[in-house]
Amino acid sequence: MTYLLLFAACIVSPFMGFAEPLAVYFGATGTLSLVPAVVAIAAGQTVGFTLLYLFGAQIRARVGWLRRRFEAFDFARLGRGRTMMTATAGVIGLPPANLLSLAGPMYDPRMAVFTGTILVGRVLRFAVLAGLPAVFGAIFDPELAPAWVQGLLGG
């Protein structure tokens, strides 16, 4: 049930930006199994991006400055680089995945490829973020962290 709630909460994370801190927190505290937590966070965020993809045209129609910016950009010049751009957006966040999702079919008409690429990229992203506390804990002495951080991590 915890992973389902985590999944549901992360659906809105493309707008709120709290999925990354969640991954680091669960990696640092060990309160949840990392693999299901990472998959739940990534899947929830991917659902949020998919909703942006599906309803991007309506959002662009209502926000004038956004519509003008997307219409001014020539997505055709990206050619075959769209999948690579989607992959970099999924893993490192550049360009922002929510902007690519808002572009929707203007950007990449193959929703399954777009969504799959984002999901794989997000799983990789959150796996790395969840693993960072263990790596830094092995390299640096956790006692050097401020008291409030040690309290947050259960130390």
Image (spheres, rainbow, N blue to C red):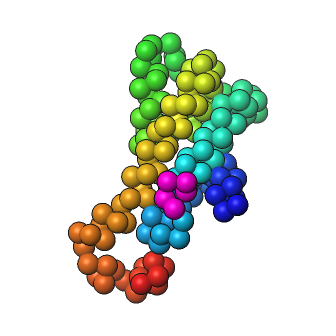
Q: Residue at x 57, y 20 (%)?
A: 108
Q: Residue 51 or 142: which is nearer the viewer?
A: 142
Number of residue marks:
0
Name the quadrant of the C terminus: bottom left
Res. 6 visible in picture:
no
Residue at image coords 57%, 35%: 99
Residue 155 appears in the picture as rendered = yes
Q: Is residue 36 magenta?
A: yes
Residue 57 drawn above or below residue 13: above
Instruction: Give how far across and how far down residue 145 sits, in percent.
Output: 34, 80
Q: Is 54 included in the stretch rendered in magenta?
A: no
> In the image as oriented, which residue stretches furthest toward the bottom?
147
Q: Residue at x 26, y 69 (%)?
A: 138
Give, as a single range, the part of the protein colored magenta: 33-37
Q: Is residue 63 left or right of residue 72?
A: right
- Residue 16: give x, y in percent of width and height: 62, 54
Please, is residue 37 above or below residue 28 in the view? Answer: above
Residue furthest left as drawn: 139
| Above/below status of 133 relative to 37 | below
Residue 36 in percent (x, y) is at 55, 54
Q: Quadrant of residue 80?
A: top left
- The residue that appears at 46% across and 82% down in the rendered structure is 154
Q: Nearer the viewer, residue 15 or 46?
A: 46
In this rendering, position of residue 76 left or right of residue 81: right
Residue 7 vs 94, above or below: the answer is below
Percent x, y of residue 118 = 52, 35
**Magenta stretch, main secondary structure class:** helix
**Quadrant housing residue 54:** top right
Quarter of the rendering occupied by the N terminus:
bottom right
